[in-house]
Amino acid sequence: MEYDFSFQNPTRIHFGKDALKRLPIELSYVGKQVLMVYGTGSIKSTGLYDTIMKTLKRAGKEVCELSGVTSNPTADKAYEGIELARRQKPDLILAVGGGSVLDCAKVVAAGALYDGDFYEQFFVKRAKAETAIPLGTVLTMAGTGSEMNGNAVITHTEHRRKSGMFSDCVYPVFSILNPELTFTVPKAQMVSGICDILSHILEAYVSPSDGDNLTDDLAEAMMRNLIRSAYRAVENPQDYTARANIMWGATLALNGLLDGSKQQDWMVHQIEHQIGAYTDCPHGLGLAAVSCNYYRLLLPYAPWRFARFATNVWGIDGHNKTQEELGELGILAMEDFFKGIGAPISLRELGMEMTAPLDEIADSCRLLPGGYHSVTHQELRKLLRDTL
Amino acid sequence: MEYDFSFQNPTRIHFGKDALKRLPIELSYVGKQVLMVYGTGSIKSTGLYDTIMKTLKRAGKEVCELSGVTSNPTADKAYEGIELARRQKPDLILAVGGGSVLDCAKVVAAGALYDGDFYEQFFVKRAKAETAIPLGTVLTMAGTGSEMNGNAVITHTEHRRKSGMFSDCVYPVFSILNPELTFTVPKAQMVSGICDILSHILEAYVSPSDGDNLTDDLAEAMMRNLIRSAYRAVENPQDYTARANIMWGATLALNGLLDGSKQQDWMVHQIEHQIGAYTDCPHGLGLAAVSCNYYRLLLPYAPWRFARFATNVWGIDGHNKTQEELGELGILAMEDFFKGIGAPISLRELGMEMTAPLDEIADSCRLLPGGYHSVTHQELRKLLRDTL
């Protein structure tokens, strides 16, 4: 694969302190019925719920609500939303919250227009949804990039499986991104989002092609900016520029921009999905916990890639070092970064016990071809044990 | 202005050596009548014309043609295309060529659906086109970014005015980008395209906001990649990776990605437009000729910006230098780059004579607010004289 790709992303972004002022215009393009989807109540305590509800009423909308979407959104909540949407037939689904709320809303947007069981269709048989109710979003947390892509991740509690769907028709029509709305996100969740962004960039970056390509340069620029902005945001959560960089970085990290010419890996996400399905851990923190050891596993297969990562992202001097030594220093620098912003670098720090069913989790992971190496369940068992 | 912007770009990109294989799928989405727009014949000598015509026939299309679009496409050619499109009522306009062909096709796409004089409406009265015939493109030259934006620049020969229109509805529905199709572009045109790309990046980069923002980081990564790739492509025009970087870089440089949080300047383009209107010089070479002295004029108003440019783009050591000294070294490095790839750094090298009506050209420039400083016609007269 050598610089061959397709790219399209139709989502309209309104970004900045005044972004919410664009909501009335967006509402004027759609019909009367709106289904508002949100989480477990933080938008009520911050006043955002009231602001949006007023805007909806002023626009003459009739609103029904799906509330209580949790992090690691469940299939059960999506079933509930689909039922509601089938009854109310909304012209717009408005998701107000973080990536979990957006992902649940996407599944509802598609599932409501199909007969039968959405989970069976889109997640088990992996059929692609070809139509969906139009979706708009007001984002309150930076991380998943769901505000500008066609991905949704759902946890099936009973099956102990966290998995994703993709469809062109669940790209939000519009997304409203005001970094100030992320100021009140608890620190651990902000850090989780930051780790998720870094992981999205790395899933593409740590894979061929290896030529001197623009996509890698953009990925490195985004990582350097994210690292600086993360330290600043941890120091001062009200730092608008840092939060804005993180928010826009999250969007660009998974909107297709970084796919150009890259084969992609995505095993860190697969591993975390199954850790999450078993433990309900915050997504980004789970990614941080396994990332460094996963990349140590890949290091011998692509030392040049990690040497480049060390030099261009972490500014490590490569003199008198082998690619492998330099690459390990890059991974160590990432470990220090995770520690520095308060993210876990082991499963124990993530809250898992000695008694956790690590082998069972490892064996439940879907194995992908990977970028430089295709891991086995055997390797994943060892990885999880080493990472405990 | 502080990180507030809207962004949407619906164009579907097919990129790579096999990108043209996606044309039949794209054709299957549209009706039978196609208007093919192209230039002065190079696509016939390379065989691209035959390939595309065969694909169109195989797809059952009825094709009419607008040929002979020149660089610095003229209003007269657009009038001719609009006449043709009004008669033939194409379901798709397929532009095959470089930015000039694409720009002419965009004007035809919009103008054909409006009564009256397109130039008067869209360029003089600056009305925004609200509808257009769907446009697809097969790009043969990298530079203008027209393949993924809503801009079109037209020269009115009689009025001696080269000016632009923008409309959401002339974004191409699809654009096919095969870097190999740029291999046969004459070197001077390739270099012109490279200068155009650098200028697009700088028009946004050399303006507020000045905070530590991701957009500036992306712009710098793109400039560093462009500079490396330009030297490689000048050395070996068949270097696929270099040509691919330049082609994708051209697209990203003017598709909205680099606007985020930036006020933008665009005076270098204004100046070149009028030089072009008087001399018909290649657009990018005209930009190169005036860029360095224009930025020298801005330097005292934003030394921090040019210091950053010197360090982050050209890798110049800032020790023991004032911001202004460092900034001047950055501009000198850009001058060396232009020389190194064979671009002009004076109007004389661009082919202008002592007797050129410099003051008249300066006075004909539209003055924009600018990023750090609003230039006057007096300053432009001096700039052009100093740059002769």
Image (tube, coloured by chain):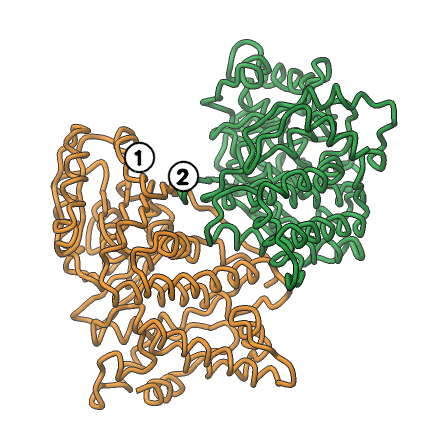
Chain colours: A orange, B green
Residue B368 shown left or right of residue A100 in the figure:
right
Tag 2, which chain?
B
Please state which amino acid type lies under the numbered disc 1: Arg
Q: CA distance from mark 1 to mark 2?
A: 10 Å
Q: Residue at x 68, y 52 (%)?
A: B325
Q: Which mark is residue B6?
A: 2
Q: Is residue A279 above or below residue B323?
A: below
Secondary structure at numbered mark 1: helix
* Mark number, residue A185: none
> Residue at image x 26%, y 41%?
A133
User: Which quadrant of the figure has residue A230?
Assistant: bottom left
Q: Mark 1 near mark 2, Cβ–Cβ under 8 Å? A: yes
In the rendered image, residue A24, in percent from the top left (x then y), is placed at: 26, 32
Residue at x 49%, y 48% (from the top left corner): B210
Task: Determine whether the residue tagged by mark 2 lies in a helix, strand or loop.
Answer: strand
**Residue B63 visible from this viewpoint:** no
The answer to which quarter of the image holds residue A334 is bottom left
Instruction: Give the crowd class for mark 1: few <14, some 14-19, many >=20 residues within 10 Å.
Output: some
- Subunit ID for the residue under disc 1: A
Name the one closer to the observer, A98 or A227: A227
What's the mark number on residue A22? 1
What is the quadrant of the N terminus of chain B in the image? Answer: top left
Q: Amino acid at mark 2?
A: Ser
Residue A320 in view: yes
Spot occupied by residue A324 in the image (x, y as percentages of width and height):
57, 84
Residue A91 percent across, percent down from the top left: 22, 36
